Amino acid sequence: MKFRLLFPLLLLPALLLPGCASKTTEVVLVPEPLEEIREAQPIETTNGSLWTTQSGSLFEDHKARAIGDIVTIVISEQARASREASTTSGRDSNYAAGIPNFFGLENHDFVVESNLDMSNMLNANFTNSFQGSGKTERSGDLTASLSAQIIDVYPNGNYKVRGGKEVMVNTEVQIIYLSGIVRPVDITAGNTIDSNKILNARISYTGRGPIADKQEPGWLGRAIDHVWPF
């Protein structure tokens, strides 16, 4: 009797553990910037000149072009998706079979007395129909400005950029992360680039805090949904 009462109590944690281990929203952390190698270099001067070798070139813009340089990403993403499907199918079948003449057995006394109609031995019909429809719609907008850093330069001259930022309001942390590949020609003279010109762009907008926690069901609810068979 005690075992019957103890068994459900032992089984309950085993059922709840898979629900507790359910996948939660992934929060992408902001990566640390690349550390530049700092070497003290003497300032070279030219006799009779007002300019030094460390001055900027008069014929060169300020666009990011080397590993460690910073470029501003203008994020303006709009996504719209709509899909609708409708299916209708049906089948109607009729079967009839008979043996009006079979080696004279149709005149046998048993057949005659039983009023068996051998010309109508089998008569069956089958009807099946199905109708289904579905529709889904999804939309999203994201507008932001983010500074990213060139972390690699490919042999063809394209840049791999990565960046992110954290914004804390009260106890809520909003995290924006971006990575992808850009072309040097897409970077404007103001050292900015639109997000729609980034190849393999990975843009993540997540958060941590009380508001983010309230957007997910509790662990007990997730556990029950995981093991509930209906």
Image (cartoon, rainbow, N blue to C red):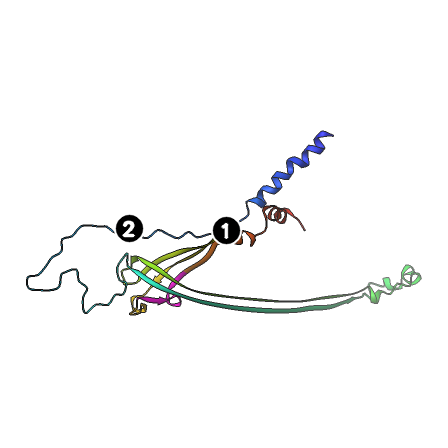
Question: Vertically, is 185 above or below 230?
Answer: below
Asked if residue 207 lies left or right of residue 7, the reply is: left
Q: Amino acid at mark 2?
A: Glu
Q: Residue furthest top?
A: 2
Give the extent of the magenta segment: 191-201
Tell me where residue 115 appears, x and y as whole percent.
91, 63
Real-space CA distance between mark 1 and mark 2, rounded to the nearest whole angstrom: 30 Å
Q: Residue at x 17, y 50 (%)?
A: 40
Disc 1: CA contacts within 10 A as few (<14), some (14-19) or many (>=20) = some
The amino acid pointed to by label 1 is Gly
Q: Would you call the spot at circle 2 few (<14 residues within 10 Å), some (14-19), or many (20 or more)? A: few
Residue 18 location, quadrant = top right
| CB under 8 Å between discs 1 and 2 | no
Q: Is residue 194 magenta?
A: yes
The location of residue 55, given as percent across then percent down, is: 17, 62
Front of the two marks 1 and 2 = 1
- Is any atom of residue 95 visible in this view? yes
Q: Is residue 215 above or below residue 187?
A: above
Which type of secondary structure does the marked residue at label 2 adopt? Answer: loop
Q: Is residue 110 above or below residue 9?
A: below
Residue 11 x, y percent position in the rendering: 64, 37
- Residue receiving disc 1: 209
**Towards the viewer: 89 or 47:** 47
The percent coordinates of residue 87 (x first, y second) are 64, 68
Circle number at residue 35: 2
Q: Is residue 100 among what the camera can see?
A: no
Q: What mark, if any, has residue 28 been given in the picture? A: none
Residue shown at 34%/59% (left/top)? 148
